[in-house]
Amino acid sequence: MKYISTRGGIDPIDFSDSVMMGLATDGGLILPENIPTVSEDTLKHWARLPYQDLALEVMKLFASDISEELLEDLIKRSYSTFDHAEVTPVVEFGDLYILELFHGPTYAFKDVALQFLGNLFSHLLSQKGSFMNILGATSGDTGSAAIYGVKGKDNIDIFILHPHGRVSPIQALQMTTVEDENVFNLAIEGNFDDCQTVVKTIFNDLDFKNTYRLGAVNSINWARVLAQVVYYIYAALKLREAGTEDPIHFSVPTGNFGDIFAGFVAREITGDLIGRLILATNENNILTRFVLEGRYQKGKVVPTLSPSMDIQVASNFERYLYYLFGRDGKIVKLTMDEFSRTGIITIDKEQLCLVRKTFSSASINQDETVDTIRRFYKRYSYVIDPHTAVGVAAAQRLRAELPPGPIVCLATAHPAKFPGAVRKAIGREPQRPYGLQGLEGKKQRYKVLPPNVDEVKKYIKSVGLKDL
């Protein structure tokens, strides 16, 4: 399997090189040259596998330059840190299913990818005798998951930018209380889009990127998307084994388009197994407007109770455009260049029909989010976090217009990470798991900076790893 750029400007590279490159050197995002499809017999075999073994079967289709023995070891070490034997269990609640993705060390779905990516980085750097400065932006959960994936590892420093005061207090504390000396938190005076713009701009400075050997942990890194593909297939096969014959739909709380793009890849791999992907947004609904109107237009970021989705520019959206535009990198480049100038992408009616064959979408406001948490708890005595509530509410709203088939809602974070929203809904805060207890009493370490590329570069130069 070789890898290319959405903008068509790089020669095909191996999986390992794609992991180290992160953002393609032509400014695009990295994708496999093709997405393999598997047979019904293969799916029947996969359905009997535990999560770790399924991960190996899926990932080895895309990581052909890594031995199966090594890949198996990386996977087993990565998911040994999870507190549930199934890694991502599926739980039934009436006419919906919840895919619990919060059993990793930071209690968010990002752990599924970043525990694996941290171990993969460590192996590749050891093999090359090299070092890496990881640079990433977070709207909440990516930061702590990335930090926990690489903290204390040799030859890796990590710099995480988060919007100062715009992530939940628990999310901030999970990042800023980590004591390992290779961890650097940058609190940026702006919103997540500002953080993401700084990171992308720095990655596009190829001299700086190469000199400081920058690595990407945001979902611009293909390995993150690949790791997330597994749990869509795992959940769908669980329901198929339980007797479901119809395609399985998934409702995905969406901000940056990385998680739902993993669902798109899983859908391509498995044929008719997966049905519609419900793109669930909060008031920052640029992606819902795209699905409903065929117009992708930047707006102002609105702070909400689901802060990890408070995003206007979805960095992974370009990957989907590559397929929508017939895998034509030149058209993707022209489109993204135009978007940089105007802030608008418009598609025609034929393309919009293609979008709607794969995606449905709904935008859920904050009152609906709180009401959904309250109703779900009242009916099932089960607490969901505000992001998950957006996905549940979208699934309930759109059910009537979907083809027959069960709906799996992705539970992207433990509710204890968002105590304020939960308290507003059910009158009390959820019980914290052990790993989230006592954070307020710990010393915090972070640097406040403006959303300025030169200031962030200057900081990396002053403390980051470099050649002697």
Image (cartoon, grey):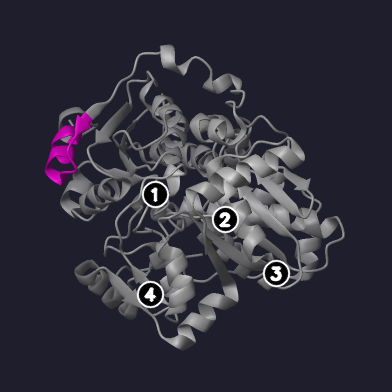
Provide the residue designation for mark 4.
Answer: 295
* Magenta highlight on residue 389: no
**Label 4 is placed on what type of residue?**
Arg
**Label 3 is placed on what type of residue?**
Ala
Q: Nearer the viewer, mark 1 or mark 3?
A: 3
Q: Where residue 157 appears, x then y in whole percent?
A: 32, 31
Q: Nearer the viewer, residue 436 or 420?
A: 420
CA gap, disc 1 and disc 4: 19 Å
CA gap, disc 2 and disc 4: 20 Å
CA gap, disc 3 and disc 4: 25 Å
Q: Where residue 242 appears, x then y in whole percent?
A: 86, 55
- The boundaries of the magenta stretch are 448-460
**Label 1 is placed on what type of residue?**
Asp
Mark linked to residue 310: 1
CA gap, disc 2 and disc 1: 15 Å
Q: Nearer the viewer, residue 30 or 340?
A: 340
Q: Tell me which numbered mark, 3 or 4, is placed earlier along the sequence.
A: 4
State the SS at label 3: helix
Contact check, label 1 and label 3, Cβ < 8 Å = no
Mark linked to residue 400: 3
In the image, residue 218 above or below residue 423: below
Provide the residue designation for mark 2.
Answer: 252
Q: Callout 4 environment at 10 Å: few (<14), some (14 to 19), or many (20+)?
A: some
